[in-house]
Structures are given as C-alpha cells and as structure tokens.
Image: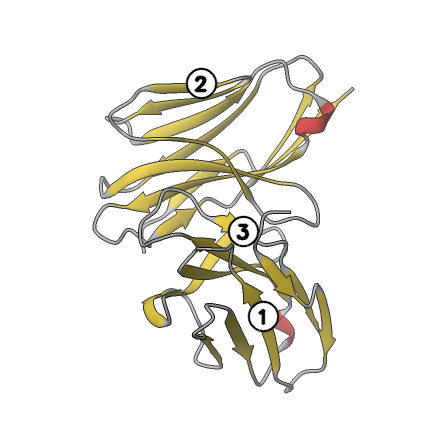
Amino acid sequence: DSGVTQTPKHLITATGQRVTLRCSPRSGDLSVYWYQQSLDQGLQFLIQYYNGEERAKGNILERFSAQQFPDLHSELNLSSLELGDSALYFCASSASLGEFGYTFGSGTRLTVV
Amino acid sequence: QQQVKQSPQSLIVQKGGISIINCAYENTAFDYFPWYQQFPGKGPALLIAIRPDVSEKKEGRFTISFNKSAKQFSLHIMDSQPGDSATYFCAARGILAKNDMRFGAGTRLTVKP
C-alpha cells in the first residue's frame, strides 16, 4: 500500500455522463497531482494542487476540473464524458512543491460506453 | 511541450540477462531524472533516480547511466528476473517548474524464465 488512496477502483459509465474520482494523499503530503494513462500511452499530467490551491495545469480538458479540500483530499470531476476519456486516472502526492519523486495511488479505471 | 522520448516500447529478455531501456530529452531545463516501475493494476512506484551532476547511480541490480551532453539517460537491469516484468517509465523534472514532471511513454518489460 503506497499510502495514496483512490476511489473507486473501477467505474463504468455512459457517454455524456459526469463522474467524480477521489484521491486521499499520503499522510503529511500537501501536493496532489492527477495523471491520465490511456491504453499503451504514457502518463499525461492533468493538474496539480498544493495545500488547496491549484499550482499547475497540464493537458486537462475544459470538461475536466479538480479541487483539493481543506483535509487535503482531492477530487477530479469529468463531465460530458466521451469514449476517448476511457483511461486509467492516477493520483500522486508529495510532501511539498518540488519534492523528489511522487507516490502514486493504484488508480481509477474509467470505462465510458 | 518538451518531450521525454523512451525506447523501446517493449522488451523481452531471458532470465539472467541485462535489460536496457533508453530515454532522451529535448532541452536542458531538467534537474531530476527518476524511473518508475508499474505492475499491472498498480500505480507507478519510484524505482531509482539521478541528478544531472552524476553520471551513474546504482541500487542493487538497477543502474541509471546519465549522459548530459547527449541528453540521454538509461536504465540497466542486471540479472533480470521474471519478477522484474513490469512497465518502466522514465521521467524528467523541470528546473524552473518543480512540479513539471514529464514522463516517457513507457517500456513493457517481459523477463522469460
């Protein structure tokens, strides 16, 4: 167990729907990162939060949004889902900005049908 | 967007052999080069990392070689074991944006018994 908890592990939903993915960072970690991993693709950075504030945005679609709550857990909201959004979504955490290495959760596998 | 290019996409090695995975980056604005190991159904886990002021780092059977002038770095797995079968990602972290971690596309390693 890496200490980063992601729920749910699997999610199947229809096109056009909206889902919320949840991430609890490792105890003491202030920074949360979201990544998307499509089939046979690398890890695409979506967004980062540090202590409740958005710090960086990557290739995140406008249909996607995220937030980090006062207890430091984070949620990634995906709306108007398309078939192409089917992927593994990983959350990672680190103790501070720029800390060497991230700790990844086990991911949420999203299937859009 | 700066890329980290990783090769090969897949690799099959016999037990006891040496596995070599290569990565190259396109600019010099990176200051930390980690490698992550991902088993099926799990998130990536930090395996080993190197700073650009060092040409080689070894941890057990895993060695990173770094060539700053060529902007290349590689992972060598000595005495490869079936348990090493996983997907390996190289990454590079931006100097100016410490939260900017770029990942390679991944290499799927299979070690045959």
Identity of the residue drawn at 27% across and 29% down: B52
Residues indicated by labels 1 and 3 sit on the same polypeptide chain: yes
> What's the mark number on residue B58?
2
Say what amino acid the circle numbered 3 marks: Phe
Answer whether residue A31 is visible to the viewer in this image: yes
Answer whether residue A113 is visible to the viewer in this image: no
Identity of the residue drawn at 40% across and 59% down: A31
At which x and y percent is residue A58?
Answer: 38, 64
Say what amino acid the circle numbered 2 marks: Lys
Asked if disc 1 and disc 3 are in contact, CB closer than 8 Å, the reply is: no
- Residue A69 lies, with reference to residue B61, above or below; the image says below
Residues indicated by labels 1 and 2 sit on the same polypeptide chain: no
At which x and y percent is residue A21?
Answer: 59, 72
Left or right for A42, reference B3: right
Q: Please rate how many residues cluster around mark 2, counting C-alpha atoms within 10 Å: few if below 14, some from 14 to 19, many from 20.
A: some
At which x and y percent is residue B6?
Answer: 46, 38
Q: Residue A70's quadrant in the figure?
A: bottom left
- Residue pointed to by mark 3: A104
Q: Residue B109's quadrant in the figure?
A: top right
Say what amino acid the circle numbered 1 marks: Arg
Q: How is the image coloured?
A: secondary structure
Mark 2, secondary structure of its residue: strand
> What's the mark number on residue A22?
1
State the residue in front, A90 or A23.
A23
